[in-house]
């Protein structure tokens, strides 16, 4: 166990616990955006920045991906962290002005109208979709394309439609309007950061309703080893 | 504050004051800003610098990605004469956020000189903001590098491929590696990793496992099918299919030359094939790395050729990369290879690596302290030796073998006797029964900088042995070059070349171990890459690339100095290994490749230390 102080509360947590988990367990709220407890933290949105007193190490760290250390003293809403948080949220809002989650967060920090312009792209590169597709679904159809020397195209998420099973988990997890999924009878239309694709839906063998994308059913049949015949019926018609 | 002669430079290496005889007005880089003149605009310098920085911000975190391009955009606007006093305030807030809330080092460290200027040289910005006139853009020399990249002889873009590995984009990572390193599978297992010695993460905790990460795309990626390059089809010969020869052949066939590679060994790979045992480098890895090179060149292997024979075959240029395979004499008075159990270490390894089963003694003595000695001992103990003992004339700290190799050998039960030198073979008829050694002590440093071992009089002692494998170094075998060929050698027996790798004979180039003496695989690859470039220039009658400032910038960009408090301490992810107990009786590979999740975790440790340096003249 590791002894820490978080917002003046003295607590003990298991080694390897992140600051965020320790705070949540102690009843303290730290704002987050790119965090989901089922997924590997990415430290992408920088909204959960907190202040720590720690020798030789940073004074300002993101709570989601920083493990606690013995004797760490954490202030989740110190003035330096709050200032950084506000500007970081402001940048996210400038990048994704239509996201209600970001707008709500920005309102809480008095940053409803960003002081600067960014070409709005909706996608904030938080990689929740990438991590969901890879870690939760096990498909790995979405990945982040970054920039570097000789790689000058803007950073973006790239989708491999051949691998995509149209499960729409990415649309569900996306905190902005960058990913959408829409069912129109026999088709599911998925749009990921401006990149659109249509998928055929499967009809229920009993009632005839379209109930899931064909590719997703094939994926589930293969993963489970149960064979396609077990997936002929929709949830309502299953015995 | 007076602008002229302002400095905030905190690097270990001082910025240059002049370059190529031209005086410098200012230098801006990750370690600060250094101003020597007031005849230029600081705002424009920052603008040009931030443009480069923003273009390199990767996109892994929104603060670095958005913050750098916002600051760059505001500076751009300011210098166009459209800035306002408010922009100055926003810039400060944004730059501060980038400095203290970015995910990795690149943006956090790169923004500091701009923060310095915004804080200390405020007037420079407010005067531009107050004027409606655009600022005249200055002339700048831009350099980008990373300490790991510049420590690598082949200048590989290490942060670039690590970032792609972190994002599971193995195909693209392999593409980046292959631009400067045609042997990713081989080097991903066996490279000496100069990059790791200069890794900035090493200043925080431990260096990133760059070698192990390189293996990930080599093992997991699907290599792209290369289309034959269009080009002149002019004929070039490469003698030697080791790393230098392969790199040169690969570079030349990519440029459209018709390349023929000769080697006396039946298999390509050179010393990586003959000298490195399969438990460190499985044969199929060499096969995989050489397959794509073989697709672009014709290989004539399994037959020794002379330089004059090759020249007669009508090539316009020849690259000699024959390595250093000839063992140095063991320096033991009654050494006689006719005795059973006496064999040069590299010959023993070469036989094992060809799949032969040479007789292995029960008590094996290996002489030497390099990687070949370690390989001999570890191979012998796998193939049935009860004991393998290394005898080395200096102490542990002078040992040239890789530390992890020495530790692994010891874990497998290899003993090392330091400060001893075999002086005489003890034999019964032509059967070896032991070695007489003499104790050594360390005297004054020699030309290599290591302390010279000196024998201690009367300290002779005996070790029982039925096999002795000296591995005290190799020299090039240049007997395939005739006197009439006009290729000059050095007094060390290596081939003499100029800066462009040309030998004394026109059209004949040389590189790798046959020029440098025994060195690393990556140095040979770098030599092969440079040779391909040189030969291409020679045949195209283009002058050699002239960059007199390269060394100055290299030292500057290799500087490991960093601002503290931007990186948490972490620990290295170690690849899984075969348990020690299972290693005997076979030569199966010990180290496993990282799983994608392990690779992602280790790749996260990279601080992405690209550095941008901009010089104003």
Image (cartoon, helix red, strand yellow):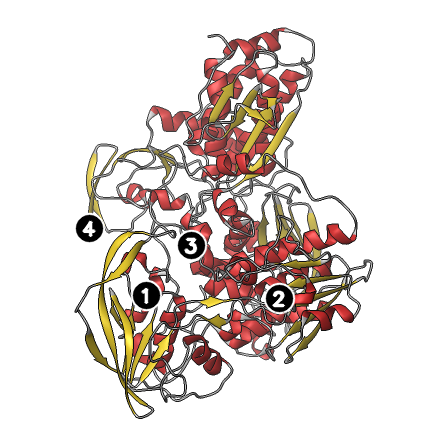
Secondary structure category for the residue under label 1: helix
Q: Residue at x 53, y 25 (%)?
A: B28
Q: Identify the subunit bearing mark 1.
A: B
Q: Nearer the viewer, mark 3 or mark 4?
A: 3
Graded by Cα atoms within 10 Å as few (under 14), some (14 to 19) or many (20 or more), the crowding at tag 1 reads many
Residue at the disc numbered 3 = B602
Residue at the disc numbered 2 = B222
Residue at the disc numbered 4 = A1
Label 4 vs label 2: CA separation? 45 Å
Q: Are marks 1 and 2 on the same chain?
A: yes
Q: Are marks 4 and 2 on the same chain?
A: no
Q: Nearer the viewer, mark 1 or mark 2?
A: 1
Q: Residue at x 60, y 43 (%)?
A: A147
Label 3 vs label 1: CA separation? 24 Å
Graded by Cα atoms within 10 Å as few (under 14), some (14 to 19) or many (20 or more), the crowding at tag 2 reads few
**Image-quadrant location for residue B567:** top left
- Residue B290, given in percent of the width and then of the height, sits at 62, 70
**Image-quadrant location for residue B172:** bottom right
């Amino acid at each position: 166990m590791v002894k820490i102080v978080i917002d003046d509360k003295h607590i003990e947590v298991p080694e390897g616990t992140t600051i965020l988990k320790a705070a949540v367990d102690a009843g303290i709220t730290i704002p987050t955006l790119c965090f989901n407890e089922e997924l590997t933290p990415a430290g992408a949105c920088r909204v959960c920045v907190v202040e720590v007193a720690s020798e030789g190490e940073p004074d300002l760290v993101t709570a989601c991906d920083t493990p606690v250390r013995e004797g760490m003293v954490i202030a989740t809403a110190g003035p330096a962290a709050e200032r950084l948080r506000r500007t970081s949220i402001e940048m996210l809002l400038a990048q994704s002005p239509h996201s209600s989650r970001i707008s709500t967060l920005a309102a809480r920090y008095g940053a409803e109208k960003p002081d600067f312009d960014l070409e709005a792209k909706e996608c904030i590169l938080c990689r929740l979709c990438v991590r969901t597709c890879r870690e939760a679904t096990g498909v790995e159809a979405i990945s982040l394309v970054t920039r570097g020397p000789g790689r000058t195209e803007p950073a973006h998420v790239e989708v491999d439609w051949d691998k995509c099973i149209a499960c729409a988990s990415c649309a569900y997890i996306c905190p902005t309007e960058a990913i959408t999924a829409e069912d129109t009878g026999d088709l599911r239309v998925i749009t990921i950061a401006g990149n659109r694709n249509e998928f055929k839906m499967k009809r229920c063998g009993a009632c005839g309703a379209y109930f899931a994308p064909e590719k997703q059913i094939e994926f589930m049949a293969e993963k489970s080893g149960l064979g396609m015949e077990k997936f002929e019926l929709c949830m309502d018609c299953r015995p | 504050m007076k602008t002229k002669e302002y400095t905030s430079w905190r690097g270990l290496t001082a910025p240059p004051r002049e370059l190529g005889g031209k005086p410098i007005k200012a230098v801006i880089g990750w370690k600060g800003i250094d101003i020597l003149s007031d005849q230029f605009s600081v705002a424009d310098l920052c603008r040009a610098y931030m443009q480069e920085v923003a273009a390199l911000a990767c996109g892994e975190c929104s603060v670095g990605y958005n913050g750098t391009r916002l600051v760059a955009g505001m500076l751009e606007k300011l210098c166009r004469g459209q800035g306002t006093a408010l922009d100055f305030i926003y810039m400060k807030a944004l730059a501060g956020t980038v400095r203290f809330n970015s995910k990795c080092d690149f943006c956090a460290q790169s923004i500091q000189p701009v923060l310095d200027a915004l804080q200390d040289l405020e007037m420079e910005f407010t005067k531009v903001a107050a004027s409606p006139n655009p600022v005249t853009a200055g002339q700048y020399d831009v350099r980008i590098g990373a300490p790991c990249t510049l420590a690598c002889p082949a200048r590989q873009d290490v942060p670039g491929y690590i970032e792609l590995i972190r994002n599971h984009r193995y195909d693209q990572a392999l593409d980046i590696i292959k631009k400067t390193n045609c042997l990713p599978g081989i080097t991903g297992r066996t490279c000496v990793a100069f990059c790791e010695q200069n890794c900035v993460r090493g200043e925080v905790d431990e260096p990133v496992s760059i070698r192990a990460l390189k293996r990930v795309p080599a093992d997991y990626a699907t290599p792209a099918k290369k289309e034959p390059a269009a080009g002149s089809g002019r004929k070039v010969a490469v003698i030697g299919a080791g790393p230098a020869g392969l790199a040169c052949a690969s570079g030349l066939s990519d440029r459209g030359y018709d390349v023929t590679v000769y080697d006396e060994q039946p298999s390509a790979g050179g010393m990586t094939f003959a000298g490195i045992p399969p438990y460190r480098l499985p044969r199929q890895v060499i096969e995989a790395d050489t397959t794509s090179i073989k697709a672009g060149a014709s290989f004539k292997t399994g037959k020794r050729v002379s330089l004059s024979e090759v020249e007669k075959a009508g090539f316009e240029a020849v690259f000699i990369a024959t390595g250093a395979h000839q063992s140095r004499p063991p320096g033991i008075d009654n050494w006689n290879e006719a005795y059973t159990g006496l064999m040069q270490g590299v010959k023993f390894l070469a036989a094992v690596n060809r799949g032969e089963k040479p007789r292995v003694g029960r008590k094996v003595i290996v002489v030497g302290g390099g990687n070949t000695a370690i390989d001999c001992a570890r191979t012998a103990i796998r193939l049935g030796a009860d004991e393998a003992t290394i005898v080395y004339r200096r102490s542990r700290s002078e040992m040239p073998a890789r530390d992890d190799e020495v530790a692994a050998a010891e874990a497998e039960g290899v003993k090392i006797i330091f400060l001893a030198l075999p002086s005489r073979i003890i034999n019964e008829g032509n059967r070896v029964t032991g070695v007489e050694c003499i104790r050594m002590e360390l005297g004054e440093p020699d030309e290599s900088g290591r302390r010279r071992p000196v024998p201690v009089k009367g300290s002779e002692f005996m070790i029982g042995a039925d096999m002795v494998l000296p591995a005290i170094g190799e020299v090039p075998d240049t007997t395939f070059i005739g006197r009439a060929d006009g290729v000059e050698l050095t007094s060390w027996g290596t081939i003499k070349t100029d800066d462009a790798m040309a030998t004394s004979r026109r059209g004949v180039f040389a590189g790798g171990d046959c020029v440098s003496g025994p060195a690393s695989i990556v140095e040979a690859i770098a030599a092969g890459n440079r040779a391909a470039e040189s030969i291409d220039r020679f045949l195209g009658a283009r002058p050699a690339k002239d960059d007199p400032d390269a060394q100055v910038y290299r030292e500057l960009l290799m500087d490991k100095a960093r601002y503290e408090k931007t990186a948490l301490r972490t620990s290295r992810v170690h690849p899984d290994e075969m348990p020690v107990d299972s290693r005997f009786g076979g030569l199966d590979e010990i180290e496993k490749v990282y799983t994608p999740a392990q690779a992602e975790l280790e790749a996260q440790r990279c601080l992405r230390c690209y550095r941008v340096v901009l010089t104003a003249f």
